[in-house]
Image (tube, rainbow, N blue to C red):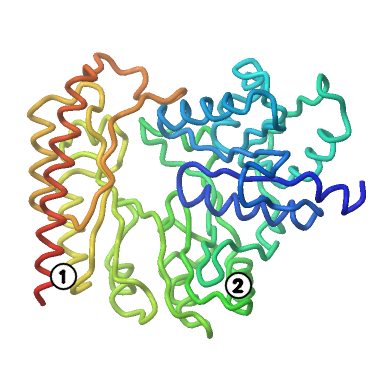
């Protein structure tokens, strides 16, 4: 198929979920553009729609299926990412308009898959690729960046923490670290193209390790690169933060003085059921160290309300922790059971009405804290 013919097959990529998915969509766009496809700005002009999906919460999945159904067979539809890995071949039974299914570790196969799809008749075009385990390093070298000033750089893939509520290890596989030199080369290439702000990404970014090079050493190496103006990272796990890491945040001149440190719950029994690997006391001690070392540093978190068997007293412990820490901001989620996870087997579950009530309480509490901190900062 000629380049002109390929360009007629305009592709629109719609992204759901985390920053990792945002970066994956850039990679997908770069791969397809290099193969001769045109990346559409909207779904209207596109012949092919790729849904790059999240499987962390049921609500996100339901929204994707609803949007797929809205096209009613008028487009070639691809399901990519975490939902694709979860459903695999079953996606075709869930909605017959889905033409191809590709897991997160197989996105490099997209140009080949689309070639198969566009060369076959409507009844035959069902393709799925969900057996990959390691991404080829070259997929990070397409040079495609949606934002000409900022880009995100994946430093590790997958996760091996197996938090009991989380589907990520099942859909993205175990933790795998990219080579230090490959990361540096990708960042240098981005800087050479005019990008000046970099965010390092990983499901558990501060667990990074390549031989004797850990995340703190990587931060120092990136901070020293010419052309870089601002450096950030997302997201950290409390069990992997330490004093040297906090010192790097404080000392590195280009590194933003902010830390996203998900606590999830303020109750030790729930933290143990979640398999988080720390206690309330551990978490608070690390917050104290961070604030002592990184003067003026901001702190944000994640909270899950309504985890199975969470008592009212345990919910109050979470509220108390939020008040004690005084987070600048928080992502507050209602517990959503996910397939394959240990938490989905825990009974009894909490009634949805009670979860809604607790969710609203935490939202209002955090909103009040955030507003107070903003007002205090504005006065300075």
Tell me the crowding category of disc 2: few under 14, some 14 to 19, or many 20 or more residues within 10 angstroms, Cα based.
Answer: many
**141 versus 275 height, above or below:** below
Q: Nearer the viewer, residue 194 or 300?
A: 194
Tell me the crowding category of disc 1: few under 14, some 14 to 19, or many 20 or more residues within 10 angstroms, Cα based.
Answer: few
Q: Secondary structure at mark 2?
A: helix
Residue with the mark numbered 1: 292
Residue with the mark numbered 2: 190
Q: Quadrant of residue 297?
A: bottom left
Q: Nearer the viewer, residue 37 or 284?
A: 37
Q: Quadrant of residue 72?
A: top right
**83 versus 264 height, above or below:** above
Residue 304 percent location from the top left of the image: 26, 36
Question: Is 52 positioned to the left or the right of 357 in the image?
Answer: right
Q: Residue furthest right?
A: 1
Residue 139 percent location from the top left of the image: 69, 56
For the point 13% across and 32% down, the residue is 315
Per the model, the C-alpha gap separating discs 1 and 2 is 34 Å
**229 versus 178 height, above or below:** below
For the point 48% across and 57% down, the residue is 201
First along the sequence among labels 1 and 2 = 2
Q: Secondary structure at mark 1?
A: helix
Residue 248 percent location from the top left of the image: 34, 74
Question: Is 320 positioned to the left or the right of 61 in the image?
Answer: left
Of tags 1 and 2, which is closer to the observer?
2
* Viewport quadrant of the C terminus: bottom left
Q: Nearer the viewer, residue 29 or 152?
A: 29
For the point 14% across and 71% down, the residue is 378
For the point 36% across and 31% down, the residue is 165
Question: Is 335 positioned to the left or the right of 327 in the image?
Answer: right
Residue 259 percent location from the top left of the image: 30, 61
Count of numbered badges drawn on the protein:
2
């Amino acid at each position: 198929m000629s380049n002109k013919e390929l360009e007629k097959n305009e592709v629109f990529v719609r992204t759901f979920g985390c920053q990792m998915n945002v970066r994956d969509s850039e990679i997908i766009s770069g791969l397809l553009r290099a193969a001769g496809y045109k990346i559409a700005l909207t779904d209207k002009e596109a012949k092919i729609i790729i849904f790059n999906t999240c499987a962390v919460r049921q609500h996100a999945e339901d929204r994707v299926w609803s949007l797929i159904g809205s096209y009613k067979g008028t487009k070639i539809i691809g399901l990519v990412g975490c939902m694709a890995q979860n459903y695999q071949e079953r996606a075709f039974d869930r909605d017959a308009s889905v033409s191809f299914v590709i897991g997160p570790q197989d996105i490099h196969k997209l140009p080949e898959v689309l070639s198969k799809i566009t060369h076959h008749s409507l009844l035959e075009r069902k393709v799925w690729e969900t057996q990959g385990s390691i991404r080829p390093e070259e997929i990070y070298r397409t040079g495609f960046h949606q934002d000409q000033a900022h880009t995100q750089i994946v430093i590790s893939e997958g996760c091996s923490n197996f938090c009991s509520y989380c589907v990520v290890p099942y859909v993205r596989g175990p933790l795998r670290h990219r080579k230090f030199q490959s990361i540096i080369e990708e960042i240098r290439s981005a800087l050479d193209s005019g990008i000046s702000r970099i965010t390092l990404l990983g499901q558990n970014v501060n667990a990074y390790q390549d031989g004797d090079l850990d995340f703190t050493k990587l931060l120092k190496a990136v901070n020293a690169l010419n052309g870089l103006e601002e450096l950030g990272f997302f997201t950290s796990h409390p069990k992997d933060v330490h004093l040297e890491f906090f010192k790097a945040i404080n000392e590195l001149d280009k590194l933003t003085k902010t830390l996203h440190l998900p606590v999830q719950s303020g109750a030790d029994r729930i933290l143990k059921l979640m398999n988080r690997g720390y206690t309330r006391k551990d978490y608070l001690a690390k917050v104290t160290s961070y604030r002592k070392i990184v003067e003026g540093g901001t702190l944000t978190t994640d909270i899950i309300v309504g985890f199975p068997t969470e008592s009212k007293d345990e919910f109050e412990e979470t509220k108390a922790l939020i008040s004690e820490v005084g987070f600048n901001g928080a992502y507050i989620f209602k517990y959503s059971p996910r397939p394959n996870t240990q938490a989905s087997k825990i009974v009894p579950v909490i009634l949805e009405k009670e979860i809604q009530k607790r969710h609203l309480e935490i939202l209002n509490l955090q909103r009040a804290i955030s507003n107070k901190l903003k007002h205090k900062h504005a006065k300075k």
